Image (cartoon, helix red, strand yellow):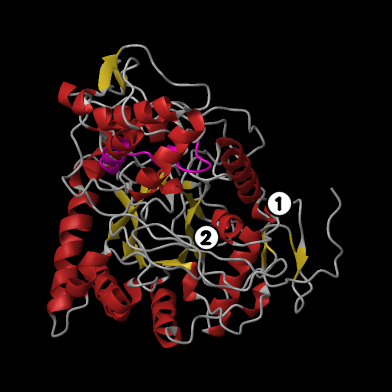
Amino acid sequence: MSLPSTSQHFLPEIKGLGRRLTKKRSRRPGNFDRSDTIKHIRFGGTRRGDRLGLLGFRIAFAGIVLLLCAAAAAIDGSQAAPIGVNWGDMARQPLAPEVVVKLLQSNNISRVKLFDTKAPILEALSGTGIEVMVGAPNSLLPALAAPGGNGEQAAADWVAQNLTRFLRRADGGVKIRYVAVGNEPFYGPNNATYGHLCLPALRNVQKAIGAAGLGGKVFATVPFSADVLDEAGASPDPSSGAFRPDIAAVMRGIVASYVETSAPFCVNLYPFINLVYSTGFPSDFAFFGAHSSRDSVTNLTYHSVFDAMFDRVVSALATVGAPALPIVVGEVGWPTDGNPVANVSNAQRFNNELLAHVANGSGSPLRPDEPFDIFLFGLLDENLKDLLDGITPYERHWGIFLHDGTPKYPIDLSGRGDSGSWPKAAVGVKHLDRKFCVLSPNLHPDPVVLGQKVDFACAHSDCSALQVGGSCSGLNSSMIASYAFNNYFQFNYQQAQFCNVDTLGMVVTTDPSTERCKFPLGLDYPAASSRSLLIARGTIFSALFPFLLFLVL
């Protein structure tokens, strides 16, 4: 495929780069100029523990398996840090921490990013030598930023409870390298609630780290979505990046604190979002190498939106006096279900091309020969992530592995081009019995009634794969009902009453999966907290299901 002429500049793709609405870790398209190429660049995401953030990007990045042959620990700009992964546990039946740690070790993953400080997870990581970024979620920012010395005390207590306690264990402790203070605090509605708390909370945590004797060993940073960058009226060129005017002063203070403490700038970047929400976006530019655009100011050529997004951050840092500040990409990846372009093929291509790009050490056009430091998003699928009323069903499918630790596709774990190598699966996983729930074959229920039952089952489980473009979107009406009933059944540990949905379901031992649509089998691990399971809102299904029946019957 021939590349565009070098006269093609960074068209409008880069504008709109960070805009997102709001939602708990989901995204939805915003208003932005859709013309040409680089104007459609958007990045960002919102993640876990807080599960806040609406559309656009969030999402966040993260994780895959990989052992980088040249692995250096320090972020000194001269050597590539080993690839990290985001480990989230927003699942109905999350794998036991010790199983996940063995999965990391078997795949030579030596760095993980967490979204909180759950004791069982940190205990499982203790003594392993795996480098960890822990998180103080947004919900803690009010306490950490409190005035009158209260914030300083809260930060000191938090450091003692969540850092010192785990760093100084007899087995060698947890190798905590970073603390994420909040998560995307300026993103969407987070801004009004947490934006003004970000800098004082960060400073108090930094002070507490120093007082605990951890200065120079543990570094506090804030993972930002790309919407910290200015879009309105800005040039789309990567070299023209700048922070939003409404937060520019705060960002200057945050960056200054990083310079003082040798901490990196952390940002989440999602090329997937550009492709999904930017009309006319060149699909090859979401990947690496098949499309190019040129910066009209520097004349530098870009072959991926990832590099363009990264360099826009580099440029923004230069405007606040930190042109050489190290950057950590806190989340980057590609989902495998829930959208027409969220599939295994694209995820395999993106992640392998990304890892090869990182491994070659070429850096970005504005930071040539400076290796990237990234955390892939994410390690495992998470079936409790919010979907924003079904608008972002791909949110539950970012994992390199399925919910049970089964790898989805070959991925280059060495970064040396062996993209046909499969990651090792989790071992010792406890599945529920091989039982499934399906629609009773001899029943012919009223389509409206059946639609209501499907709606109910989906509202209390995970039917994201049934959404348009999903792996199970092509099922007939009875299979749609069976898929919904089975998910509800598995979510509730295969208790018989959760299959007998008004006598419509029946338990079978034969797997009803098709080649494309896999019926999940639950795991025999304690359920996640009793937070709302109304996660795949039924309104979409109740409106769609009778129509599907009309087409099929």
Name the residue at 49% across, 82% down.
Answer: 244
Task: Classify residue 475 as left or right of residue 11.
Answer: left
* Rendering quarter of residue 184: bottom left
In the rendered structure, does residue 126 fall within the stretch colored magenta? no
Please state the horizontal and vertical placement of residue 475, each as a whole percent of the image. 48, 29
| Alpha-carbon span between mark 2 and mark 1 | 17 Å
Q: Which class describes the residues within 10 Å of circle 1: few (<14), some (14-19), or many (20+)?
A: some
Q: What label sits on residue 269 in the rendered view?
A: 2
Q: Amino acid at mark 1?
A: Asp
Name the residue at 43% across, 54% down.
Answer: 391
Which of 494/294 is in front?
A: 494
Which callout, 2 or 1, points to the residue nearer the camera?
1
Circles 2 and 1 in contact, beta carbons < 8 Å: no
Between discs 2 and 1, the one toward the N terminus: 2
Which of 209/535 is in front?
A: 535
In the rendered structure, does residue 470 fall within the stretch colored magenta? yes
Name the residue at 36% across, 62% down.
Answer: 23
Helix or strand or loop: what does disc 2 sit on?
Answer: loop
Q: What label sits on residue 284 in the rendered view?
A: 1
Relative to 345, say whether 5 is above or below. Answer: below
Task: Classify residue 114 as left or right of residue 16.
Answer: left
Relative to 427, say whether 197 is above or below. Answer: below
Q: Amino acid at mark 2?
A: Leu
Residue segment shown in magenta? 454-471
Helix or strand or loop: what does disc 1 sit on?
Answer: helix
Name the residue at 31% across, 78% down.
Answer: 192
